[in-house]
Structures are given as structure tokens and as C-alpha cells.
Image: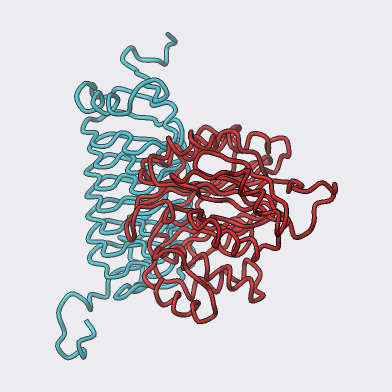
Chain colours: A red, B cyan
């Protein structure tokens, strides 16, 4: 069992309270997933990290998992100046680096000079936090209640098929500004891996969800739009799943052909909220007048920012 | 107190007290005919499971998993939607969902009546053992799977594999059937079927004509091992 939550705000004023709205949603799903939790939030603006006043188009944000390691960020920024500028924001055992370095160069540089850091996400809008442990503590540690942005996806995990570690927590990411959370279990993740690895796609864990995440992102890099990638996923991904996917400007939800795992949607003029169960939506504003429905199996639901 | 309120009417607010306390009260302290209301259900699981007295219970909102499961004698009305397994293993009484029901509504129910005004998701009436289920809307795939006894009325459409491996339960569908499951077949309506539908639709306060429904029942080809069927069954 796991819990998934998603929230996309249509009313711009609500962007300021995105995190505050989602905290009770995640807490409500912590019974379904008491061993790990995570969240990816899509923010509005990329900050500038140099002194020119213009944000270079190469600028990206990187969410990093630090764990127990001590990092001297002044030294990090100083050393990085050989290849570019960066600003760092620490949050618990995570940090967000905004840098105008070429992304592949920066990733290689981090791998070489700071192998103890793990890059959780890359993109222009995504910030990602995840860890093993009690969801309530994780929510407090990173102050999810203060997060702002246009949309987010969250997850509470009850591991069934691979280890409980920070890296196995959801969301999983691939490429840029792309993440996926999963409730369920896939039966063919290894055949998906064997299909993707010869194309140079590298996996970081043995988790089944990572296979789905990398498969869908690979389809999109090959030219599929999100809907087509998801349609292809129905054929390629075998097993039980409710997937919730976040991209720069979209949330998408799909369920397997047997609807083995739950999902419920509440939609008002102001927001779209998605959860495994209604009990974590009950607190939302104006919920009594929301349109509430359960997506049918193999229906593709996509909401735009 | 107004003239309509009886002295022993009770209201519980789940925003104010734990569900476990409410359920224990419902198990041990109710009087026959008592009217009880539960406020702020907010999707909680196991609301009013294991009732065993002829009370009228209103749940004023959406309920979570297994609402009114194992019901005996009670008349339960849920104003909103329900999660998986509403009225599962019901023994008698009546459960009425005003909204929609998630998967496995009425699973294994032995007797009594389950009415769902909206749609029911997949596996509605799975392993039904004698209860009646009336769904005002559509039912999802695999509904009536291995249903052993009882009657299901679907006023909308049915999904894939309706009535797969049916035993003696009878399913009536007013709309389209996407596909029938193994050993389920359309059969001619009889006078008994029309009167059954009349009775169940009336109980569910629905006004459709029994003439609009089709009957699905078991072809009984799976009842006995057939050594000549090339091991298909």
C-alpha cells in the first residue's frame, strides 16, 4: 500500500498556500505509507544566480540529497566557479542548487567532487524532497507547509518490493521537470530496464516505479506527448498501478486496467486535488461543492497549469 | 425539541469523537427503531460496521472503506459517496448510497438490499451470496464475478466481463454491456424476472420499466469438469 496526493491550483492566489493545503493531504495518507514520504513541487520562477540581471536559458535547479554528510557550501560555490555560478538553499538534509552551468557538466562535476551528494531532480521548475521515515517528521523537517508553487505531487510509501531507503522513496524523476509517484506494484520492471539500458538510460535503484518513470520520460524524449506516452505505458507497463505524474505545466493521473489501486479527484474552479482516498481531501476549501469522481481504469486525466 | 424529533434520536460528530467509540455505542447501546445521525464522516474507514439492530442510521457525507460492512437489520443511508467494499458481507437490512460507490460494493453480501444511486466501480457484487443490489448508474468491469446467489439490477451500463463465472445469481442490465464474462449469458426474461425487477426498482425508488432490462445468468457450463473440453475448464 502507498498513498499518493496531487494538487494543482487554478486560482493564482492559492499558489502561496500550495504547501499549506497539501500538508493535511499527505498526513491523511500517512497510514497508507508510514515508512517514507516525498514531494515534488513545481515553482513559478527560476531565480537568477549571476550578476547580469538576466537568467541564462541554461540555468537549472537541482535538488540534492545530502543525508548525514557535512558540506561546506561556501567552498562548494567557490570551487564551482571554474564552470559557473550557483546559489544554494539548504533545507534539512536537502539543498537546492540554482546554477547557470551546463547541466551535464554540473552533474559530472558534482559526481566527481561531491560523490556523497545525490541529485534528486533537475529542471527549471521542480524542487524535490524525499526521505525514509515517518511522513509527519518529513513534512516538518522540510516545512512542506511553507512551499509555494503551481502544482505538486506527493507520496507516502509502504514498501512492498524493494528496500526502504531515501533513494527508494517517491517521487522518482527522469530527465528534467518530470516526476512520478506510484501506488501499486509492477510485474515487469526488469524487462522495461532491459529495454531502456541499452539506450544509455541509467537506473539508480532496483525500484519498480523508477522503471515506469524512466520509460515514460524516454517516450517523451522520443517525441511522444504526455498523453501518447501514457497510452503506450498501458501496453508496456504490466502490473497494478495508480500513477500520478508531474511535469513543468501538467499533472497527469492514470490507473491500471483493473483499477486495483484507488484514486479520487476533487475539482473546483480554484483547484484540482487528487488523492488515494477522500479522507485526505475532506479538509480542502469548498470541498462540499467540488466535483468528486473516481477516474476509470486506463483513462488518461491531464490537468494544465 | 420539535414534534418530529423523537426523544431517543442521537447525533454523533466524528469531528468531535473517535469512530471507535461511535461504533462501540452502535454495537451495544442502541434501541430498536432509534434514529442516529453521524456527522462529518469525511471519508473515514469502517463507519458503522457490524451493526446488528433495527435502527435508522444516516451518515451525513462521504464514507471511506467498508462503510456499513457486515450490516444486520439496520437501515443505513449514506448521503455522499463511499469507498471500496460498502456493505460487504451484509447479512440483512438495507444500505442506501446517495452518491457513487468505489470498487467491490456489496462484496459477498448474504442478504438485505444495497442501493447505489450513482455509479458503482469495478467488481460490484463480487461473490454475492444472496443479497440484492440495485445500482442507479453504471457498474464497472468484473461486476457479479462468481456471484453465487442474489440479484443485481444495473440501471445504466455494465463494463467488461459482467457475471464472469456466475453461479445462481441473476443480473439485470438496462443499458449496454461491454462484454460478458466466462459462462455468463443473456437469457429470455420471464414473468418472474419482471416481477422481481418491479419489486427491486420500487424498493430502490426508481421508476424504470422492467421491460427495459435484460437478464444475464449462468450458462452452467463451468459447473462440472468436462474432460472432453481439452482442459479448457
Q: With B4 as the anchor, is A41 left or right in this view? A: right
Q: Is residue A235 above or below residue A59?
A: below
Give the image quarter of residue A188. bottom left
Residue in the image at 32% along x and 34% along y? B75
Q: With B173 as the anchor, is A178 left or right in this view? A: right
Query: B108 or A29, which is in the foreground?
Result: A29
Expressed as whole percent of the image width and height from the top left, the position of residue B82 reads 41, 43
Expressed as whole percent of the image width and height from the top left, the position of residue B179 reads 42, 73
Residue in the image at 23% along x and 64% along y? B168
Q: Farthest residue to the top: give it.
A: B1
The answer to whether residue A108 is visible is: yes
Expressed as whole percent of the image width and height from the top left, the position of residue A31 reads 36, 41
Residue in the image at 36% along x and 66% along y? B215
Query: B221 or A224, which is in the foreground?
Result: A224
Expressed as whole percent of the image width and height from the top left, the position of residue B77 reads 39, 35
Residue in the image at 30% along x and 68% along y? B217
The answer to whether residue B117 is visible is: no
- Total marks shown come to 0
Q: Farthest residue to the right: give it.
A: A53
Query: A260 or A89, which is in the foreground?
Result: A89
Query: A295 or B227, which is in the foreground?
Result: A295
Amino acid at each position: 500500500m502507498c498513498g499518493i496526493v496531487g494538487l494543482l491550483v487554478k486560482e493564482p492566489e492559492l499558489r502561496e498556500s500550495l504547501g499549506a493545503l497539501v500538508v493535511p493531504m499527505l498526513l491523511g495518507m500517512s497510514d497508507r505509507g508510514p515508512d517514507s514520504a516525498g514531494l515534488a513541487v513545481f515553482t513559478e520562477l527560476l531565480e537568477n544566480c549571476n550578476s547580469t540581471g538576466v537568467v541564462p536559458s541554461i540555468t537549472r535547479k537541482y535538488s540534492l540529497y545530502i543525508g548525514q554528510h557535512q558540506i561546506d557550501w561556501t567552498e562548494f560555490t567557490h570551487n564551482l566557479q571554474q564552470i559557473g555560478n550557483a546559489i544554494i538553499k539548504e533545507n534539512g538534509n536537502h539543498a537546492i542548487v540554482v546554477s547557470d552551468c551546463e547541466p551535464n557538466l554540473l552533474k559530472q562535476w558534482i559526481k566527481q567532487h561531491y560523490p556523497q551528494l545525490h541529485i534528486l531532480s533537475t529542471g527549471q521548475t521542480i524542487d524535490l524532497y524525499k526521505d525514509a521515515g515517518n511522513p509527519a517528521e518529513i513534512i516538518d523537517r522540510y516545512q512542506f507547509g511553507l512551499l509555494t508553487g503551481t502544482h505538486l505531487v506527493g507520496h507516502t510509501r509502504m514498501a512492498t518490493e524493494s528496500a526502504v531507503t531515501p533513494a527508494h522513496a517517491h517521487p522518482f524523476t527522469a530527465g528534467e521537470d518530470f516526476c512520478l509517484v506510484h501506488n501499486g506494484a509492477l510485474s515487469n520492471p526488469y524487462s522495461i530496464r532491459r529495454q531502456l539500458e541499452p539506450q544509455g538510460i541509467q537506473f539508480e535503484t532496483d525500484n519498480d516505479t523508477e522503471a515506469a518513470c524512466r520509460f515514460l520520460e524516454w517516450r517523451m524524449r522520443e517525441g511522444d506527448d504526455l498523453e501518447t506516452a501514457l497510452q503506450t505505458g498501458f501496453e508496456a507497463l504490466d502490473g497494478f498501478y495508480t500513477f500520478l505524474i508531474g511535469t513543468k505545466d501538467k499533472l497527469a493521473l492514470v490507473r491500471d486496467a483493473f483499477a486495483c489501486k484507488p484514486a479520487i479527484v476533487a475539482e473546483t474552479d480554484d483547484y484540482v486535488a487528487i488523492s488515494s482516498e477522500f479522507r485526505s481531501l475532506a479538509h480542502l476549501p469548498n470541498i462540499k461543492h467540488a466535483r468528486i469522481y473516481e477516474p476509470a481504469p486506463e483513462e488518461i486525466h491531464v490537468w494544465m497549469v | 425539541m420539535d414534534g418530529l424529533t423523537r426523544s431517543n434520536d442521537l447525533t454523533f460528530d466524528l469531528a468531535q469523537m473517535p469512530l471507535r467509540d461511535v461504533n462501540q455505542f452502535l454495537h451495544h447501546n442502541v434501541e430498536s427503531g432509534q434514529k442516529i445521525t453521524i456527522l462529518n464522516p469525511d471519508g473515514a474507514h469502517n463507519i458503522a460496521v457490524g451493526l446488528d439492530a433495527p435502527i435508522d442510521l444516516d451518515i451525513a457525507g462521504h464514507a471511506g472503506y467498508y462503510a456499513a460492512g457486515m450490516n444486520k437489520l439496520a437501515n443505513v443511508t449514506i448521503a455522499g459517496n463511499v469507498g471500496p467494499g460498502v456493505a460487504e458481507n451484509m447479512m440483512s437490512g438495507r444500505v442506501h448510497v446517495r452518491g457513487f460507490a468505489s470498487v467491490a460494493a456489496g462484496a459477498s453480501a448474504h442478504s438485505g438490499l444495497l442501493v447505489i444511486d450513482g455509479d458503482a466501480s469495478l467488481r460490484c457484487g463480487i461473490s454475492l451470496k444472496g443479497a440484492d443490489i440495485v445500482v442507479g448508474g453504471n457498474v464497472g468491469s468484473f461486476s457479479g464475478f462468481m456471484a453465487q446467489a442474489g440479484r443485481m439490477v444495473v440501471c445504466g451500463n455494465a463494463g467488461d466481463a459482467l457475471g464472469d463465472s456466475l453461479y445462481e445469481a441473476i443480473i439485470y442490465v438496462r443499458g449496454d454491456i461491454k462484454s460478458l464474462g466466462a459462462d455468463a449469458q443473456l437469457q429470455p426474461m420471464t414473468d418472474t424476472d419482471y416481477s422481481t425487477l418491479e419489486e427491486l426498482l420500487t424498493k430502490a425508488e426508481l421508476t424504470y420499466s422492467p421491460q427495459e432490462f435484460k437478464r444475464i445468468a449462468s450458462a452452467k457450463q463451468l459447473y462440472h469438469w468436462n474432460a472432453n473440453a481439452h482442459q479448457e475448464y
